Amino acid sequence: MNRRSFSSSREARRRIGLQVEQLEFRCTPATLVNPTTLTYQDIDGDDVRVVLSKPILTPLNANSIFKFSAGTVNGSNSVKQQLHAINLTNVGVPAEGTNITLTATRDLVNGGDGFAAVGQINATGIDLGAVSVDGDLGRVLAGDLFFPLPGLTSLSVHSMGAYGTSTGAPDLNTSINGALSSLKVATDIRAASISANSIGSATIGGSIIGGSDFDSGVLFAGDIGVLRIGGNLAGGKGDSTGDISCQKLQTLTIGGSVLGGAGTSSGHISAAHVGVLLIGGDVVAGVADDSGVIVLGGLNSCVIGGSVIGSAGTFAGCVLISGDVASVHIGGDLVGGSAPFSGELSIGGNLGSATVGGSVIRGGFGFNGEVFVGGGIGTMSIAGNLLDGEIQSAGKIGSVTIGGSIIAGDNFGGDIRSTGGIGSIAIGRDLSGTIETSKDIGAVLIRGSVVGSFGKPARIEAVGQAVPSKTADIAIGRITVLGRVENAEILAGYDVGETPTNADAQIGTVFVGGNWIASSIVAGVTAGADLNFGTPDDLKISGPGTKDEPSLSSRIGTVTIRGQLLRSDFSSLRFGFVAEEIGHFSAGGVTIPVHAGKHNDVINLGITGDVTLREV
């Protein structure tokens, strides 16, 4: 499953005709203490001790195993040395399963920082046991081609890649043939990459940070058990940087944010399936396409503590799941950028529940600042506003709760669309956008007002029930608006996109607490040539593909308007309450008498002269 092919450095063997001599521990540079132990003085003065679990060190091979920036093993004790490499490739089978422990101690005389950097550990073709480096490690190469045993049992380091290749590694690409059972990095992985067939568990105390090179700051494996990152997953200048890529991941926890960089596919998470995804901060796009993105095949649950924010990049600042998702929580906002498909939550399958603690905001033209679900939605809750953004579902939506308002912007957004019907919608304040479905709406509660504008009315549209009864086809069960209704249309029998398709559509109950201004309610009816409802050329919906059962008739059950019917600002426009039958109507505290049955009422309402109750 290795992603790269790594070259092995070949160290020239120096054969020194000396016998092994047991020595006491001495904190002098590059001293062979015994067959398992070597000590040296780090470049900044630390006393460093390297211990191998197997007695494979001899005076004949020590200088082929340990490569320093200057000096040799048992060389000059006055030289401070940078350990470039520990190379076990020439040892072969005797090194199988070796544990390597490197510890650093600050010297009271020579100083130091208590850490020792190592360029690389090269055990290509050899399975290693536990490797621990008390400092920074550039890279490690380990593992044979026989995968039942781990290529590296565990790797524990203070950091990886902090000093680039200056400590002696030719590159920062760690490659493990086989499994890496455990990975622990106390601080950051900086521009370094780790590739393994699988990773049992990994804990990164700091951040994974991409660099300027392609594929830097990358964690790649077939399967990963539990992965914890205390800081950020941050993309860099290079493409595919700051990246986590695997097949299956049981749990991923990121204490900070997922941050896109300047490179394409930077700040990126991709997996076939993730059990639980927890992000404490934000998911933020970079300037490039596909940056600040989570792309998964399937997901059980996801919690993002902050916001999801798009940018000028396409598919940037997004959470994209191709399969089913049980639950998604975004603590902040979902904000689109200026490019299409940015600032987007997209679920290809069914979504059990979703919550947005802030608002859903479109940032520009195109598909951005939206929630798109290929299947159904159980519950959807937005604490703030749906500001020019959209919620779209190809299946049924059980319930939608908007704490603020649904606001149409200049891009004709502010929409909730469902092809499978909507159980209930509750809006905390106002509606100026559109609610529409290809099936039916059970109930709509708007605690504020419904206010559109000339040329862009607010709309509530529904076609009807998937399987109506012999006597009823309720497209909209109940609409309650506590404020006023102005420049709005409530259309029953209309599909998504204002397409009239159902001549039998019915509306149950409509209640409006405020005034009714320049607005219409129709069921199963189209406007005639004058494009105005309530006029004599209103027609029953007809034409190819129209649903029109002989036993059913379009109907508006009850309309109650507590306020007044007021005139439009445009005297040429007309408005109406139109269906084949209207059961009850009252406005301003006055009940308007209507005849029982169908096709028998045409009543001018109020004193404005532009509103008519009409049974077609």
Image: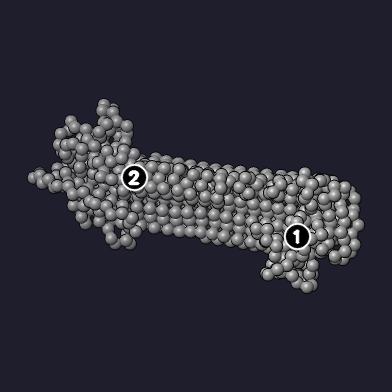
Q: Nearer the viewer, residue 81 or 358?
A: 358
Closer to the camera, 269 or 504? 504
Residue 106 x %, y %: 30, 32
Q: Residue at x 58, y 46 (%)?
A: 362
Which residue is drawn at the image coordinates 10% and 44% (left, top)? 16
Specify the quadrant that holds the N terminus.
bottom left
Q: Is residue 203 visible?
A: no
The residue identified by callout 2 is 213
Q: Is residue 616 above or below residue 120?
A: below
Residue closer to the observer: 310 or 612:
612
The C terminus - image quarter: bottom right
Image quarter for residue 372? bottom right
Q: Nearer the viewer, mark 1 or mark 2?
A: 1
Q: Quadrant of residue 384?
A: top right
Say which residue appears at 20% left-offset and 42% top-offset: 67
Residue furthest toward the left?
A: 17
Q: Is residue 147 left or right of residue 321?
A: left
Measure the alpha-carbon separation of dots 1 and 2.
64 Å
- 556 sits left or right of 199 in the view: right
Q: Which residue is mark 1?
A: 528
Residue 534 visible from this viewpoint: yes
384 sits left or right of 214 in the view: right
Q: Nearer the viewer, residue 108 or 501?
A: 501
Disc 1 crowd, CA 10 A, few/some/many (<14, 14-19, 20+) = some
Q: Earlier in the sequence, mark 1 or mark 2?
A: 2
- Badge 2 density bin: few <14, some 14–19, many ≥20, Cα 10 Å: some
Expressed as whole percent of the image width and height from the top left, the position of residue 14 reads 12, 45
Task: Find residue 563 and report its horizontal and vertical position in percent.
Answer: 84, 46
Q: Picture quarter containing residue 34? A: top left
Going by the numbered disc 1, the residue's amino acid type is Gly
